[in-house]
Amino acid sequence: MAAALVGACIAVHAHDDDAAAAARIPQRAALLARAQAELERGDATQALDDFERAAMMLHAADAELGLIRAAMQDGQYRRALAFCAHTAGEHTDDADGGALYAWLLRVGGQASQSDRVLADARAHTPDAPVTRAAGAALALDPPVATGLLLTSPHRMAPWPSATGGPVPPAARFASNAVLVDDGRAALVPLAALAPESPARLWVRNGLGQAVEASRADDAALAARGLARLRLHAALPVGASRESAGRAPFAGSPGYSLRFGDTREPAWPMLTQGFLGGLAGAGAARRVGFDSAPGAPVLDAGGALVGITLGTTRPQAAWLPLSDATSAPAAPASTAARAGLALVAPDEIYEAGLRRALQVLVEPRRASRQ
Amino acid sequence: MKTSLLALGRTLLAATIASAFAGAALAQSSTAPITIKIIGFNDFHGNLQSPGTFGQNTIVPAAQRPAVGGAEYIAAYVARLKAQNPLNVVVGGGDFIGASPLISALFFDEPTVEVMNHVGVDFTSVGNHEFDKGSAELKRLQNGGCKLTNGQPDPNSCRGIGSRAPGTFDGAQFKWLSANVIETATGHTLLPAYGIKSFNGVKVAFIGMTLKGTPGIVTPTGVAGLQFQDEADTVNALVPRLRAQGIEAIVVLVHQGGFQSSPNVGDINGCDGNLLNSDGSKSDIENIVNRLDDAVDLVVSAHTHAAYNCSANTVDVKNVGGKAQSTPRPTGIANKVGRLIPVTSASAFGRIVTDIDVTLDPKTRNVIAVSPTNRLVDRTDPAINQAIATDPTVRNIVQGYNALVSPLANAVVGTIARALPSTAGAAGEEPAGSLIADAQLAATQPASLGGAQIAFMNAGGVRSPGFVSAASTYPYALTYGNAFTVQPFGNSLVTMTLTATQLKALLEQQFSGCAGQTANRVMQASNGLKYSWSAAAPACSKIVDVTFTPTDVTVAPPVVTGAPEIVVSNGVVQNPGHTFRVTVNNFMATGGDGFTTLIGGVNSLGGAQDIDALVAYLANYKAPAAAYDPTLPAMGIPRVTLLP
């Protein structure tokens, strides 16, 4: 069916008035509508395919923005970011491109570049509601998309995709958490589940994929202030790696991804800095950047290595996975890192999108305030 | 007058056959047709890293499309094509830069220019995005030199990873061409209108230009003082000038294009719908080609990011039961006399390169055949990956800039109260080296991390200029980038046990002539160790006194934790069997810099990388904590004393 649609399509030249040109291609409009529907139901692969076909018919912002959001829905942050750089620079009359690029840069750890891009977008489209709304949201730490920024075509978040049934409207954001055990379990700060255990709870990753979970007994973890959640269905881990090896040495680059206080699907925000040494007599270690309890900690290569315990510097701390899971510690890698011993944060962010989780809880009594 | 493509093909076949009958000698004579290879791509937009996956056509399921692109892959594919024919030229269709990802944009697109120099691009047309930052900036990218911001060198310019020296930007070694872009002040083209390359004495001209509508899609400041003229008129006006130079083979590189449409599946070597618009009207590129002088033999187009190949090699690819059914359909776009001209485009972002074999008649200097093929820049090709492994130059440039994109590169890791250069004093002690040795001791001092008591750093591993402020202002906040400049090798730390005898032997081995040492190589010692050496004493007998005072360097300032111990007195080891835990880097641990004594160390334990140790140590000296000050008595400097 897709091929038939494409086969019937007729292309037009670029840099005509995009809206008018698009309107002259009804098949393209149908393809875009179908791609958007696929995206909104979480079928990122098919959406990518159809947006790409639409992009082959007309060089216009709408299909490119769809491609970018579909790539994000699919966890391809680097592809989305690179394409969005082009869209923001090419279609400067379309405020969505600049606003989305600023958003993606910010959540990916490029705050100063985000500010610059947003300023450029405001200069080109000073009256665009999307740039005003994005500017207000990006002033938050971390940014949270609300209102206009959750509506199509301005959405700054993944679309929900529940593999175990929809998350009920009464569910609220309780904490960040970390996906472990090949996607079958999550670690969450024990405090997030207090004072009383929720009736039901869900976890949702940075791709908008949610699944119900149950608390599993783990006394050793509880002693460290953590709880283990057993996922009713596994969430994908993609190519992201989970390291049970010895914790990264103090002074090495470290990263964390955390969500803001929202029950809506969201893209987490990356923070970065350098990991520290032991934070006292226990296994916790210092961390040189702000985070939130329950957020994943990734090492210089993007491997998941731990979970954050504290919040802001200088009290910020994290616990290596090897200590959280009682797994035998393998020797730390001493392989030389090339060049500046840094990878760009976009690679880290892409690795962490599936590891960072929102914990959503439904109170035991629905009428509870 | 030229003949049709099909007729030309027959001519070529006849010529080839004639050559075959005439034998090799005749085939290589000056009258035999010669084939050159034109390698083209367009709309790269600074995509130094892969833009994702891409399919040969839309039948290929998304999951089966290979990852494509990336600068090192383009370089490798171009190198492969060049190797197939030494008579080659690499060309672009514009928009190499602009609207580019951070890895290029943050550095003013200098990384892309540097990479294209290494790819070996010869000529490219300008595109509309070459004007995003104005004509003066485009000229800077062409000619080289650092970007100035508010009159000062911009810190993100001239990083020089792909230039000839750090701190420089070479500019483009290829030529940007702008035949239809006129500076109103001078009446001349902004950049050369065309470039010429000669193949076995036959000259081929490449005319480059952007779309005349560029001012409508670029910010006004970007095109201030420039006029953009009609594309076809520009080419046609140049033809007599080129012919006057004996040139009959003319290629147009134009930043304008079209799209494939009905009725097929958009194969990268298709020309579906002959690039017509939706209403059946002519596309922009067709409007240009239809008016071109018959002297033009090939058009390399761009701008729409579409892939197409309207030529003798066009294929119609249909979806038949989910499988591609390919049917050859030689075509092209008619020029002003109705001759079909090959028109190509290679998508965008480095996904595709166009491989064009052009056959020339050396006698008439005319083009007698054009055979283009669009090829995916497929990152899964084993031979290409092997080629990149063999020559990682471009990959290294990309990785270098990728690291610089990280905000951590400019993150402050500590503060120094005064300059700590890497230059050695008379005794061999370097201010930067002392800090590094302390950092390595701190990283391995806890019992669980090695229990080290002493650390040594080889002086050759402390890179110039040490820890200094470029502006000579102190206290200075050191960045991760500064730290890496001094510790770039990625060595890891090794803690081992040495006896006092081995420790003295190690210290003796610092000096030329002792145990195979070929030069004086004074190690940098950590806090708590002090020794003296005699310049006049013979080799292997230079160490006079050595004392060790246990010192905790994990706190700031360091704290003495035990009584001093005399290890060597007047050249005599006092307690030969006494052991010390000593940290060095893995280079030294394996005998590097001639320190073969270290090979005899026992109970070795691997540790952190040197740069990590340095960052962790400096965290104790980061504001609001007091700055690192080597003059504080607690630092125990000097640690080495030179005796007559």
Image (cartoon, rainbow, N blue to C red):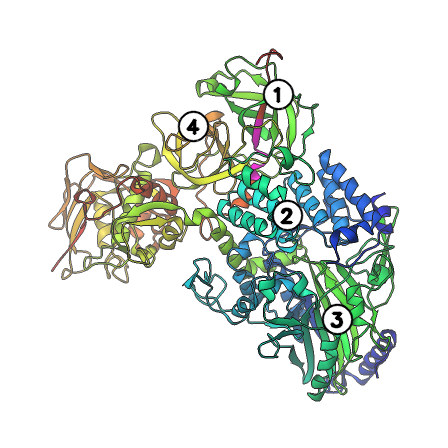
Q: Earlier in the sequence, mark 4 or mark 1?
A: 1
Q: Earlier in the sequence, mark 4 or mark 2?
A: 2
Tell whether position A355 is magenta.
yes
> What element does badge 2 sit on?
helix
Q: The residue marked by circle 2 belongs to what chain? A: A
* In the rendered image, residues at marks 3 and 4 fall on the same chain: no
> What element does badge 3 sit on?
strand
Q: The residue marked by circle 1 belongs to what chain? A: A
Q: Are marks 1 and 3 in contact (CB under 8 Å)?
A: no
Q: Nearer the viewer, mark 1 or mark 2?
A: 2
Q: Nearer the viewer, mark 4 or mark 1?
A: 1
> Residue B191's x, y, as percent?
60, 75
Tell me how far mark 2 sits from mark 3, CA to CA: 35 Å
Q: Are marks 2 and 3 in contact (CB under 8 Å)?
A: no
Query: In this view of the protein, which residue sits in the foreground, B422 or B80?
Result: B422
Tell me how far mark 3 sits from mark 4, CA to CA: 62 Å
Residue on which the image places disc 3: B299
Q: Which residue appears at 74% of the width and 39% of the height?
A: A36
Residue on which the image places disc 2: A95
Q: Residues within 10 Å of mark 4 (few under 14, many from 20)?
A: many
